[in-house]
């Protein structure tokens, strides 16, 4: 009996690696590009990019197509093509509303972000629109067990977007415009070549809007609040910190988030294999194996975190990067130094990763929602007390934030029948 609790560990391990590679191709490239920008370009440009990415992530959550999980029920009630067409039109209306709001309040927006290129803000809404449609369609393919196609629609647009964005940053003087314009052109290319034939106005029927919205409403609203809490813990956290912290603090916070997003690739593949495995064991009422698997995976995350710490320490002590690059990477030492906080956050998140499948598999969504909300509030209190009362480094404060946020649902799970 291996770590995944079955005799097919090699297959599960291979699946985990494939998921990590796919996620790395789709999302990892942008994180690496951001770290390159942080190393070679001014901090103010990097800070604007991070805040705008936070806005783009928030826009994604407003689009109905962000919540692919609602398809698990809707797909049984309506034809998949009809669902896509209806949601496509709703998303187009939302895109129009975004653009109108951006045009109406552009002066306030420009002042807040200290950046005044209106095209970029419109590109944010467009990028979120296309990215969500692609991921949404991939969920339908997953439900139809067409996994090879699903991976293509989930990963390829982000990879193409990264390649074009890299070119945009290298060519254009306005690096922020180059980043988001390149991303948009890459997404648009993917949409025209692959997605336009799948998601169009063909077979669109107005009569489907009302029943689809009726079935979707409760599920999307609940998922929206959970997503917002996740956003407040990551890119959205920069908006909270911006209220009290300095720009230098926000840059350090951006480094931590970027490095963590790269490290997360190691956990993504494991989670994609672990979660379905837990659900399968619970469906078969094998709680003993599910519980054993939970602890095995948690130990695995501890070992991965330890290896990360050792590896980063070795890099920091053995590789004179400033000398190697003739001092051109002025921020590289800062990025490497905050890597320890990113690793701690990776470890803190593992407590949530191992228990959340239990909450979902046992249909304890409401309980998980309330626990997450309470822990998030306490985590913000802990961050405030740490940074402004105990005068801790913002990296330490952010690590404490994640520790509190993830430990509460984990501890509560130990006191319930789910384990």
Image (cartoon, helix red, strand yellow):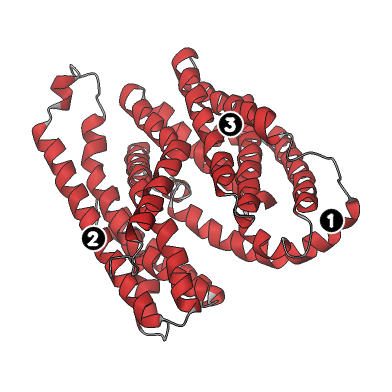
Crowd class of label 3 (few under 14; some 14 to 19; many from 20; radius 10 Å) = some
- Give the residue drawn at x 43%, y 70%: 278
Q: Nearer the viewer, mark 3 or mark 2?
A: 2
Front residue of 273/238: it is: 273
- Decide which of tag 3 and tag 1 comes sooner along the chain: 3
- Give the residue drawn at x 44%, y 55%: 233
Query: Whole-percent x and y of residue 137?
Result: 65, 46
The tag on residue 302 is 2
On the rendered image, what quadrant is the C terminus found in? bottom left
Q: Helix, strand or loop at disc 3?
A: helix
Count of picture labels: 3
- The residue wearing badge 3 is 110
Furthest residue toward front: 7
Q: Report the Cα–Cα distance between label 3 and label 1.
A: 36 Å
> Is residue 92 rendered to the left or right of residue 60?
right
Query: Whole-percent x and y of residue 83?
Result: 77, 53
On the rendered image, what quadrant is the N terminus found in? bottom left
The answer to whether residue 284 is above or below residue 385 is: below
The picture quadrant where one finds residue 34 is top left
- Decide which of tag 3 and tag 2 comes sooner along the chain: 3
Q: Report the Cα–Cα distance between label 2 and label 1.
A: 47 Å
Q: Report the Cα–Cα distance between label 3 and label 2.
A: 43 Å
Q: Helix, strand or loop at disc 1?
A: helix
The answer to whether residue 128 is above or below residue 356 is: above
Crowd class of label 1 (few under 14; some 14 to 19; many from 20; radius 10 Å) = some
- Decide which of tag 2 and tag 1 comes sooner along the chain: 1
- The residue wearing badge 1 is 209
Q: Nearer the viewer, mark 3 or mark 1?
A: 1
- Give the residue drawn at x 40%, y 81%: 287
């Amino acid at each position: 009996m291996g770590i995944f609790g079955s005799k097919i560990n090699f297959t599960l391990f291979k699946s985990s690696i494939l998921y990590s590679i796919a996620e790395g191709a789709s999302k990892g490239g942008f994180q690496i590009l951001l770290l390159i920008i942080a190393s070679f370009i001014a901090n103010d440009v990097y800070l604007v990019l991070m805040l705008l990415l936070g806005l783009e992530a928030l826009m994604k959550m407003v689009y109905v197509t962000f919540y692919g999980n609602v398809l698990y029920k809707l797909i049984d009630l309506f034809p998949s093509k009809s669902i896509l067409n209806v949601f496509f039109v709703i998303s187009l209306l939302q895109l129009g509303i975004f653009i109108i709001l951006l045009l109406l309040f552009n002066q306030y927006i420009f002042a807040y972000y200290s950046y005044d290129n209106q095209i970029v803000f419109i590109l944010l809404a467009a990028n979120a629109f296309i990215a969500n449609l692609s991921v949404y369609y991939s969920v339908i393919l997953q439900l139809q067990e067409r996994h090879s196609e699903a991976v293509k629609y989930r990963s390829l647009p982000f990879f193409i977007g990264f390649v074009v964005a890299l070119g945009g940053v290298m060519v254009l003087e306005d690096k922020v415009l180059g980043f988001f314009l390149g991303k948009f052109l890459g997404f648009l290319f993917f949409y025209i070549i692959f997605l336009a034939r799948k998601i169009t106005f063909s077979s669109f029927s107005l009569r489907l809007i009302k029943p689809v919205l009726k079935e979707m409403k409760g599920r999307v609203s609940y998922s929206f609040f959970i997503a917002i809490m996740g956003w407040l813990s990551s890119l959205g956290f920069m908006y909270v910190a911006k209220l009290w912290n300095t720009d230098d603090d926000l840059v350090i916070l951006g480094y931590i988030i970027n490095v963590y997003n790269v490290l997360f690739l190691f956990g993504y593949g494991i989670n994609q294999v672990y979660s379905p495995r837990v659900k399968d064991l619970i469906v078969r009422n094998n709680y003993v194996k599910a519980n054993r698997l939970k602890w095995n995976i948690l130990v695995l995350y501890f070992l991965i975190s330890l290896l990360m710490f050792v590896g980063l320490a070795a890099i920091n002590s053995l590789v004179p990067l400033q000398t190697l690059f003739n001092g051109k990477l002025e921020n590289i030492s800062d990025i490497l130094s905050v890597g320890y906080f990113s690793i701690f956050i990776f470890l803190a998140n593992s407590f949530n990763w191992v228990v959340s499948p239990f909450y979902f598999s046992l249909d304890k969504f409401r309980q998980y929602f309330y626990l997450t909300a309470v822990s998030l509030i306490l985590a913000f209190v802990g961050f405030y007390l740490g940074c402004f009362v105990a005068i801790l480094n913002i990296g330490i404060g952010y690590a404490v934030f994640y520790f509190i946020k993830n430990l509460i649902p984990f501890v509560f799970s130990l006191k319930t029948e789910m384990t």
